[in-house]
Image: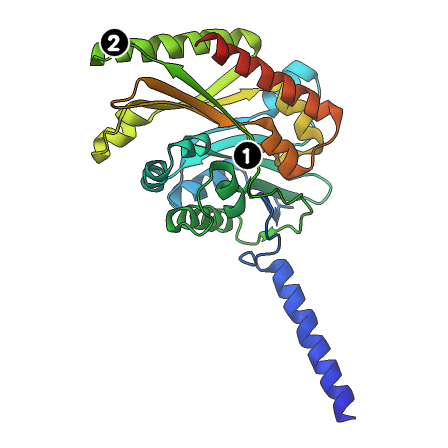
Amino acid sequence: MKNIYKVIVVTFLALGTMAFAAVNPKAEINKGQSVQVFSAPNTDGAITTKSIDAAFEKSGLAMGGDNNMNSPFEKRFNHVHYQTYNLAMFSNTELMIKLIKKNPKFGALTPLSMSIWSDDTKKTMNIATLSLTGMSKAVGIAENDPDLVAYAGMVKKALIAAMPKGVFQKTKFPIVKKSASFAQEFVIDVSATDEKGIQEVKENLEAGFEGEMEPLGFLLPNYMNLQKDVFAPAGYNEYDFYTTYSICKFDVIYPVSKLHPEAGAWAPCSMYIYKKKGENKIHIGYLGVDSWISSLGINDKESTGPLYEAQGLINKIIEGMK
């Protein structure tokens, strides 16, 4: 009888532990996956994109923009997939500087991005962001790097602050090999050596890039002059210039978001453009669309087609500027 009682108690405790893991927002339930989805009940509609933005700001993550995608979707396609679908950008200046010092390619995650969408059937609000693993794999900074850990922790803290009753969903996204790199990287030689000439190169490069992108339907919702506005005020002057663009395209995110709303963890994608002092090369890079496809298990042509087409257009523009 005592043995039966022990079995019952152990079973009860085990079930209780499993239940806690399912509802504990701090629990690691999707180890190795690059994208995490945090969801909370929202039957009363109290959680809004504005309340989420405010919580992120209070948690130390400055919002670089939060775009209501449904407005242009409705006008352009006469249909929306969700009652709410937003793409937002955010960053923390202190950690951003530390991580770019360690690896300038961290600009491909500057700013970070997230999608916010409603599940109208379950009456929930959902937020997709990159996990610590996803951030690490994307830019090649070790997963145990203290600054990267702190950044991922700050994101988690902001998610919980934004939706206190939220939990991380149990997802089944593919686990991407650490050795896999989908980065699109380019190098442009520079002959100018004086400050004025270098700045002219920068301005001409950016003007040409913007001028080519916008007629093709690409949006540039965020631009960060990191060297001028972030690095220099902090006393960090290793670059002649370092800028990032956030890039988005309605004809891409609309079909992708239908089946993969979590793709906003990668979009708008960030592109860095920098030149180190003493070097005669400009480095340009961003995370390729295979980062989206591999980490989310995207295999439908309605999504992969527009993604590869957009990447091809971007790469063609950059190659044309060499």
**Distance from the alpha carbon under mark 2 to that under mark 1:** 34 Å
Say left or right for 301 vs 107: right
Query: In the picture, residue 25 is in which quadrant?
Result: bottom right
Query: Residue 285 at what x, y percent from top left?
Result: 46, 24
- Residue 98 is situated, as x and y percent measured from the top left of the image, at 32, 41
Quick check: 177 above or below 28?
Answer: above
Residue at 56% x, 36% y is 265
- Residue 264 lies left or right of residue 202; in this view the side is right
Whether residue 31 is visible to the viewer of this picture, yes or no, is yes
Q: Residue at x 56, y 59 (%)?
A: 27
Q: Which SS class for mark 2?
A: helix
- What residue appears at the point 38 percent right and 51 percent down from the top-left corner? 146
- Front residue of 127 and 196: 196
Viewer-nearest of discs 2 and 1: 1
Which amino acid, mark 2?
A: Gly
Which quarter of the rendering shows the C terminus? top left
Q: Position of residue 112 (x, y in %)?
A: 46, 35
Q: Quadrant of the N terminus?
A: bottom right
Q: From what the image shows, is residue 283 above or below residue 16?
A: above
Q: Which residue is mark 2?
A: 197
Side of 33 relative to 300 (left or right): left
SS label for mark 1: loop
Residue 84 appears anywhere in the view: no
Q: Is residue 13 above or below residue 284?
A: below
Task: For label 1, count other residues whose C-alpha is less than 10 Å away and answer few (under 14), some (14-19) or many (20+).
Answer: some
- Along the horizontal axis of the image, is 121 left or right of 37? right
Badge 2 crowding class, 10 Å Cα cut-off, few under 14, some 14 to 19, many 20 or more, is: few
Q: Which residue is mark 1?
A: 181
